[in-house]
Image: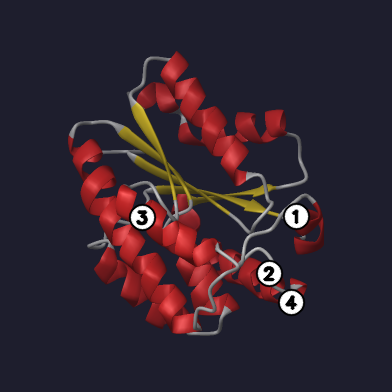
Amino acid sequence: MNNSYIAFEGIDGCGKSTLAEKISSQLNQSGINNVLVREPGGTKVGEGIRNLLLSHEYVVSEFTEALLFAAQRSQLINEVVQPNIEKNIKIISDRSAYSSVAYQGVGRELGYEKIYQLNDIAINSLWPQKVILIDIDPKVALARQAIADRIGSDKIEFFEKVRAGYLEIAKKNSSNFLVLDGESSIEHNLTEINNWLNFDDTK
């Protein structure tokens, strides 16, 4: 099915969560069934892993971090994403497996292909069909955050690498990525997203 699994991506503070919520709300108002999910999280198991991953209480090694993200994602795909797609219900996701490729693969320097393959196994090759990447200068994005979680507290250099990783992913998957300016207005970006996804043709 076309546009069944749509993900919003970008570094912390880019504004993707707001846009994901607004698109989900628009679909509800149009009578298009959808489920809004977030990563990490989205299931009871996933929310438990989220608390561990984002808490300042734990020191998590880089590859352990990648494995934990993959584990919560596997649970989300099997428990929520796949079953709803099979019911013709759209998935609007705040992050996806592409986050790990950018954050752990490129940002943590664990390897683009290595983390891609790890997640491909975890999600049984069910990658988002459409991805909206909100691109923004890390300095601008991080200044928006009042309180940062463990990963959001990392150094600016880390987020510069993550941003570069995202742009590399978008370039390699240009046919199903829409890259938007995170400093543009919400209204402008919503218009761009709606024009690109063209939901009227995918009910």
Q: Earlier in the sequence, mark 1 or mark 3?
A: 3
Q: Earlier in the sequence, mark 1 or mark 4?
A: 1
Residue in the image at 66% along x and 36% along y: 189
Q: Amino acid at mark 1?
A: Ala
The quadrant in which the N terminus is found is top left
Q: Which mark is residue 157?
A: 4
Callout 1 secondary element: helix
Q: Position of residue 186 (x, y in %)?
A: 70, 33
Spatial CA span between label 3 and label 4? 28 Å
Q: Nearer the viewer, residue 185 or 191?
A: 185
Spatial CA span between label 1 and label 2? 10 Å
Asked if one can make out residue 195 in the rendered structure from this viewpoint, the answer is: no
Residue in the image at 33% along x and 47% along y: 43
Residue placed under numbered mark 2 in the picture: 159
Residue placed under numbered mark 1 in the picture: 141
Quadrant in which residue 37 is drawn: top left
Spatial CA span between label 1 and label 3? 25 Å
Spatial CA span between label 1 and label 4? 13 Å
| Direction from residue 177 to residue 151 in the image, left or right | right
Q: Amino acid at mark 3?
A: Gly
Badge 3 density bin: few <14, some 14–19, many ≥20, Cα 10 Å: many
Marks counted in the figure total 4
Q: Position of residue 93 (x, y in %)?
A: 43, 44
Whether pointer 2 and pointer 4 mark residues with C-beta atoms closer than 8 Å, the reply is yes
Whether pointer 1 and pointer 2 mark residues with C-beta atoms closer than 8 Å, the reply is yes
Circle nearer the viewer, 3 or 4: 3
Q: Which mark is residue 46?
A: 3
Whether pointer 1 and pointer 4 mark residues with C-beta atoms closer than 8 Å, the reply is no
